[in-house]
Image (spheres, helix red, strand yellow):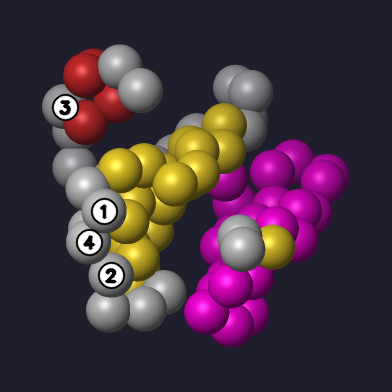
């Protein structure tokens, strides 16, 4: 991860669990593990805006970019 990714505030912030936080930017989703102090996952929409974002359960997220919808299992 580059430092400039964290210069602006995220548009939304979600908690998957007590130690996992999801940061939602216009073009990127970053999942941070607070206990381990690491970035677990980073998803980039390759130039398009992330139009919707849903947490299905503590290990599954769903988001859409343009005409595509992605369901991602995190663990």
Task: Residue 11: tell me if it is visible.
Answer: no
Distance between mark 3 and mark 1 Cα atoms: 22 Å
Please tell me which of labels 3 and 2 falls first in the chain.
3
Mark in front: 1 vs 2: 1
Q: Are marks 2 and 4 in contact (CB under 8 Å)?
A: yes
| Helix, strand or loop status at disc 2 | loop
| Helix, strand or loop status at disc 1 | loop
Q: Residue at x 32, y 62 (%)?
A: 21
Q: Residue at x 63, y 23 (%)?
A: 46
Using the rendered view, name the quadrant where residue 45 is placed: top right
Magenta region? 50-72
User: Residue under circle 1?
Assistant: 36
Q: Nearer the viewer, residue 28 or 67?
A: 28
43 above or below 69? above
Q: Are marks 3 and 4 in contact (CB under 8 Å)?
A: no
Image location (x, y in percent) of residue 69:
79, 54
Q: Residue at x 76, y 53 (%)?
A: 70
Please tell me which of labels 1 and 2 falls first in the chain.
2
Q: Are marks 3 and 1 in contact (CB under 8 Å)?
A: no
Distance between mark 3 and mark 4 Cα atoms: 22 Å
Image location (x, y in percent) of residue 16:
41, 74
User: Residue under circle 3?
Assistant: 7
Q: Going by the picture, which residue comes out furthest to the front? A: 36
User: Residue under circle 2?
Assistant: 19
User: Residue under circle 4?
Assistant: 35
Please tell me which of labels 3 and 1 falls first in the chain.
3
Q: Are marks 1 and 4 in contact (CB under 8 Å)?
A: yes
Image location (x, y in percent) of residue 1:
35, 23
Q: Would you say 70 lies left or right of 5 here?
A: right
Q: Nearer the viewer, residue 35 or 62?
A: 35
Rate crowding at label 3 as few (under 14), some (14 to 19) or many (20 or more) other CA atoms within 10 Å.
few
Q: Residue at x 22, y 48 (%)?
A: 37
């Amino acid at each position: 991860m580059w430092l400039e990714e964290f210069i602006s505030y995220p548009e939304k912030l979600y908690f998957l669990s007590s130690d996992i936080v999801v940061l939602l930017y216009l073009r990127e989703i970053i999942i941070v593990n607070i206990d381990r102090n690491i970035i677990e996952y980073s998803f980039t929409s390759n130039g398009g805006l992330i139009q919707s974002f849903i947490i299905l359960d503590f290990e599954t997220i769903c988001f859409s970019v343009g005409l595509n919808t992605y369901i991602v299992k995190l663990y």
